[in-house]
Amino acid sequence: MKSILLSLQDGQKESALLEGLHLLQAGKVIALPTDTVYGLAVDPLNQEAVQRLFAVKQRPPEVAIPLLLADATQLRQVVSAVPPVARRLAAAFWPGALTLILPARPILPANLLAGGHSVAVRWPDAPAIHALANALGRPLAVTSANRSGCAPACTAGEVIAQLAGRIPLILDGGPTPGRTPSTIVDLTGHEPHLLRPGPIPWTEIQHVANEQEDPA
């Protein structure tokens, strides 16, 4: 397979995103920039595409794939419950580098969830994600654009170095902000639980999580 590199510069952005959308609709894996590192994306409701993503990344099947949203309204498409603490954290830190673990809706494929019942969701500050998730009509399943165990990619060139010939398209949006993945917080229990430290400090998350609801 030949990997095509398309630029997201203003004059080429529309055609590049359209090609990305066509490939997502066809069940293919594409690479694109996020607000942390470059990611590999597929349609989350296409079970074969999700399996292809695992194969491209050489990701263990027991490690679930996160979903990236076009905006907060897409949250209800993929989660079955949004507790008050999730609403507070989303309002405070989205769009941004905070991933929330919430109960998954039954429409999501079992392989996406690695056989579990929860899903990782995030609204990133990433225009290419917003555009493609809006055009697809649902969030994207996205994981970092590197082979499992290797360093995350912050440029299109670093994606090519690891994955050339394994994916049909790389959308080049220039360097991403950094190699630090998002902070992950599990909200499926009685209290928020930090699963992975990241750009948003745990102390800030705890402060927002413990705020009292305004009276109705």
Image (spheres, grey):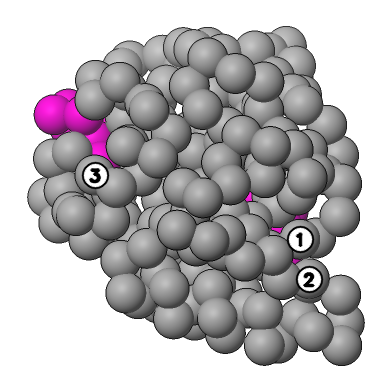
Please tell me in which quadrant of the rendered image residue 205 appears.
top right
**What SS does tag 2 mark?**
strand
Q: Give x and y (percent) for residue 63.
A: 32, 23
Amino acid type, residue under disc 2 in the picture:
Ser
Residue, disc 2? 7
Residue at position x 27%, y 56% in the image? 49
Which label sits on residue 210?
none
Q: In this view of the protein, can residue 162 be seen by the observer?
A: yes
Residue, disc 3? 51
N-terminal of the two: label 3 or label 1?
3
Alpha-carbon span between mark 1 and mark 2: 5 Å
Direction from residue 147 to residue 205 in the image, left or right: right
The region drawn magenta spans 112-127
Nearer-the-camera pick, 124 or 40: 40
Image vertical order of residue 46 relative to residue 208, above or below: below
Residue, disc 1? 172
Direction from residue 202 to residue 71 in the image, left or right: left
Image vertical order of residue 118 relative to residue 17, above or below: above
Please tell me in which quadrant of the rendered image residue 96 appears.
top right
Amino acid type, residue under disc 3 in the picture:
Gln
Label 3 neighbour load within 10 Å: few <14, some 14-19, many 20+: some
